[in-house]
Amino acid sequence: MSPQNQPPSGAVANLPVFETLGAAFVAVAGQPLLLLRAMAGGLMLLAVAAIIFIALPNALTGMLAIFAPLAAYSHFGVNWYRIMLLGPSGLVRPALRWDRRHWTFFGYGLALGSTLLVIYLTVTALVPVLPGAVVAVALWYLAARCCFLFPTLAVQEPYSFALAWQHTKGQGLRLTAALLMAAIPLYLMVSLIVSLVVFATMGEAFTALVELQQNGGFDPESTEAADAFRAAVEAIPPVTLISVKMIFEALTMVVLAVLFGIVALAFRICTGWVPDGGGLPAAPGDDGTDSEDR
């Protein structure tokens, strides 16, 4: 942001929920090859982490497997936000490049996610009568109010959580609704697809588990039960396990592409942001007369 073009004091326009939702889906469905290119680096990172963990299972590779998804989603997030805000030319090249943008995106994502998780666990523990779903929706709202920081990290615009909160004032419920309307059906669809793939490729392990349950229940402390289930899992070729994981991760990134798209479009609408030189199609609700380069 240049000194003469300071951020607005609040949202410059109301977020059109359904139009923004539709535009995010169109952006994902309308450029599948670009989506795959944006996903490539993150998927490679996940594949390498999975192979290392399967080949050398220990505490260190276990930690790598835990943090690899967040790193991969951060890598993809930087790519997709740049595409949504700068157009196809914004895609970071080469595919495996990791620089300060990615570290910052990763760090803020880890901080925000950890904070929301701690809040969820604390509230549900202190107020057990409060349904977990209610707490989760409230946290989605908090995340929505903070999420404008992430597209700005991707395009390296000076920004802050305070500005994000300021620019989503009065728009938080709209943004939360758009995100949930996309996330819930997509999550259910991905869960169904992954369940079918898992049962198709790991059926013997689950059959063994069901038989154990029918014969008195699966007792993790039972050597016989644990050995039977472990043997069924170990019989699955590693390439199959990695393939199932990569299918899940690719579908997860498609879901994230829609959610990131909603956030990017909402950021443009609520702040009036356009890149230097323009070049992007109008965002939903933008008549093309009020936005200024910032």
Image: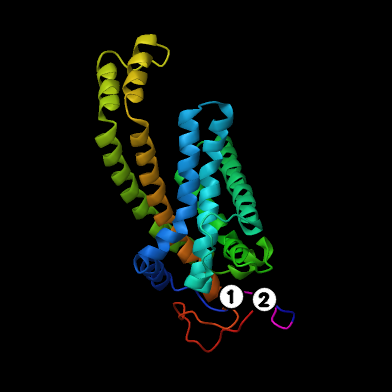
Direction top: furthest residue: 223
Query: Of residues 32 and 207, which is closer to you in this image?
Result: 32
Query: Of residues 116 and 264, which is closer to you in this image?
Result: 264
Q: Position of residue 280 (x, y in %)?
A: 49, 79
**In the picture, which quadrant includes the N terminus?**
bottom right
Against 44, residue 32 (above or below) is below
Kindly identify the residue that appears in the image at 58 percent across and 47 percent down: 113
Q: Position of residue 60 (x, y in %)?
A: 59, 30
Secondary structure type for disc 1? helix
Chain part drawn in magenta: 4-10
Q: Amino acid at mark 2?
A: Pro
Q: Main secondary structure of the magenta part?
A: loop
Secondary structure type for disc 2? loop
Q: Which residue is mark 1?
A: 271
* Left or right: where 262 falls relative to 97: left
Q: Which of the 4 quarters of the picture holds residue 272?
A: bottom right
Against 229, residue 266 (above or below) is below
* Left or right: where 11 falls relative to 282: right
Kindly identify the residue that appears in the image at 44 percent across and 77 percent down: 284
Q: Amino acid at mark 1?
A: Thr
| Residue contact at pointers 2 and 1, CB within 8 angstroms | yes
Q: Which residue is mark 2?
A: 7
Local crowd at mark 2 within 10 Å, few (<14), some, or many (≥20)?
A: some
Q: Position of residue 147 (x, y in %)?
A: 57, 60
Kindly identify the residue that appears in the image at 36 percent across and 35 percent down: 239
